[in-house]
Image (cartoon, rainbow, N blue to C red):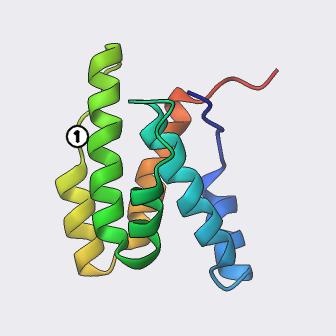
Amino acid sequence: MNIKARNIVTAIILTIVTCGIYGIYWAICLARESVSVKDPADSAILEIVLFLFLPFLGFFLAEQKFAAGCKEKGIPHNDNSILYLILGLVGLGIVNYCMMQSDLNKLATPAA
């Protein structure tokens, strides 16, 4: 489980400035890191493809694996997968990015 803490405001600004290119990179990182909580050997290919083409479904699946991994490891976490699905369908996908990054930041490895 190698999770990197990211500043959410900086990530949003970079996404806007790069016309969404950083957002694609950010989505790939979110998918890999959230899925790695449950299974570090999982490459998260399914979630990455879904993040790129059906983001609401990608967030839904990644959050389910993240919540299951937290439960297995005894880490307190509420499963927000349904909320991610609804927000994505309503067009508030950026909120999903922020919420997932916030959850991952809580588990991030402290900088040395």
Q: Could you tell me residue 27's position as x and y percent?
A: 53, 62
Q: Which quadrant, please, contains the C terminus? A: top right
Residue 27 vertical placement versus 77 (above, below): below
Residue 103 visible to the viewer: no
Q: Which quadrant, please, contains the N terminus? A: top right
Q: Residue at x 56, y 59 (%)?
A: 28
Amino acid carrying label 1: it is Asp
Q: Is residue 48 left or right of residue 10?
A: left
Q: Residue at x 65, y 80 (%)?
A: 16
Residue 54 vertical placement versus 60 (above, below): below
Closer to us: 35 or 105: 35
Closer to us: 51 or 92: 51
Q: Quadrant of residue 87?
A: bottom left
Q: In this view, does 101 lie to the left or right of 7?
A: left
Q: Which residue is drawn at 40% across and 64% down?
A: 95
Q: In this view, does 41 lie to the left or right of 84?
A: right
Residue at the far right in the pictured view: 112
Q: Could you tell me residue 85's position as x and y percent?
A: 22, 64
Residue 98 vertical placement versus 19 (above, below): above
Residue 96 vertical placement versus 100 (above, below): below
What residue is disc 1 on?
Answer: 79
